[in-house]
Image (cartoon, helix red, strand yellow):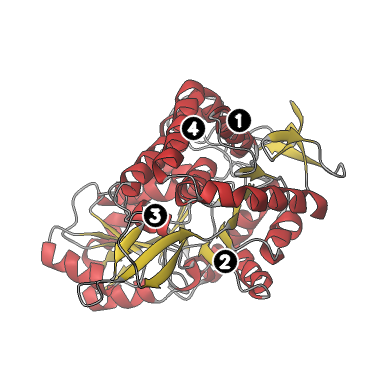
Amino acid sequence: MIENRNFYINGAWVAPAKSRDFEVIDPSTEDVCAVISLGDQADTDAAVGAATAAFPGWAATPPAERAKYVRAILDQYEARKEEMAKAISLEMGAPIDMARDSQAPCLPWHLKGFLTAFDEIEWIRPLGPHAPNDRIAMEPIGVVGLITPWNWPMNQVTLKVIPALLAGCTIVLKPSEEAPLSSLLFAEFVHDAGVPAGVFNLVNGDGAGVGSQLSRHEDVAMISFTGSTRAGRAISAAAAETLKRVTLELGGKGANVIFADADEKAIKRGVIHCMNNSGQSCNAPTRMLVERSIYDQAVETAAEVAGKIGVGPASEPGRHIGPVVNKSQWGKIQDMIEVGIKEGARLVAGGPGLPEGMNKGYYVRPTVFADVDNQMRIAREEIFGPVLSIIPFEDEKRAVEIANDTPYGLTNYVQSQDGAKRNRMARALRSGMVEMNGQARGAGSPFGGVKMSGRAREGGVWGIEEFLEVKAISGWSGEAS
């Protein structure tokens, strides 16, 4: 077990102002795997104070030099990537092979993408030929509070910390208290990379404590949050008093629209994607919309695929799914499975309770419901577990209506061999992202949604510019400054 880990403030590991311990649970075993301290107002103030003091110097640091520090963070990761994979696997239950192949590598993937995008930013740019003495300056917004979740911990830490550093902002990071170990290791990377004191700070805490304190703090210019829609609302309300910028990346209820002319692997691909990471992804395709003419076969195939998905401990190698993150989340998923049964959906795979042969750990059976109506709760609410709802549709028009009939709008998916149809669907679907025929978005593509999924755009140039202010300047002389 990892004993009490301190905070990283002003370039050093420091003890909390008051000791309030929090037990981190290994979801595979239900055993305590670490004990951390949760911060209070004094810790938040100390971190914000350090970031505030460091901001003028970091903002004035030449962009190329800021990029050198970021590359040094990448070097630290490459030297210790196995540690990162093991930390993620332990804290949130990702199977170790997945942690090595998908979870931990989010750091180099996004970091390299940001460095590529960074080279494209014109920090002082002309307004246009009509105004030869006007310039637009892109400047860092200031001290930023970054609040990250437990489901893809390094993905979200990297998507926030790296562009903020490149933009010239100083940072206070509050990782999820459920999965803090990977972020503490990341703080070691930042320290060992030589990032100046005060530029990056980390305070562990919960949403009601450090999260709310950062959201209300008058010296924090921006909050970037990834998590639930409920928490996003609370953060927006708390931040309104100081009129700070707020960017939110929230929940989803993605529709995977499968037409009769979809490729033969479309159903299997959709089920596996839904169940990946034990269903704990905001962009999971949890509503499978299937054209009526292939519906019965699709249900049969989906049930077969889900039935073959293994469930096991995170420490074991293999392609199985692990547990969900904690007891509370497990209970919510079980409740929603029961809701689906009571609502009259047809259970064709999985169901309530632990998988066969398991009596400990927060494991969920890969579950598939057929004959789902889009007004059922299992079709409208984000379950955040390995639960798939299959809904039939008659034609393209009806598919769009069902897909868009949701409070969320993060990612939708389309499966068809008809290119013109795919293009029409991509434009008609109300979401921040559309992925088609299993093709993932390219490096530098922005991640974010609309409606109750928030309106952040993380990744690429857009991800860096979220941390920049636009300053309009007239009377520019053109002389070297």
Determine the image quadrant of residue 6.
top right
Q: Which residue is mark 3?
A: 481
Sequence-first disc among 3 and 4: 4
Q: Which residue is mark 1?
A: 188
Q: Is residue 212 rendered to the left or right of residue 40?
A: left
Location of the C terminus (image quadrant): bottom left
Determine the image quadrant of residue 393.
bottom left
Q: Which of the pair 69/240 is nearer the observer?
A: 69
Give the class, few, some or many, for how many residues have Cα within 10 Å of label 3's Cα (few <14, many ≥20): few
Q: CA distance from mark 3 to mark 4?
A: 31 Å
Q: Amino acid at mark 1?
A: Glu
Q: Which residue is mark 2?
A: 229
Q: Amino acid at mark 2?
A: Thr
Q: Amino acid at mark 3?
A: Ser
Q: Which residue is mark 4?
A: 73
Sequence-first disc among 4 and 1: 4
The secondary structure type at the circle numbered 2 is helix
Q: Amino acid at mark 4?
A: Ile
The secondary structure type at the circle numbered 4 is helix
Sequence-first disc among 2 and 3: 2
Q: In the image, residue 174 lies at what x, y percent?
A: 65, 49
Q: CA distance from mark 4 to mark 1?
A: 9 Å
Closer to viewer: mark 2 or mark 3: 3
Q: CA distance from mark 1 to mark 2?
A: 31 Å
Closer to viewer: mark 4 or mark 2: 4
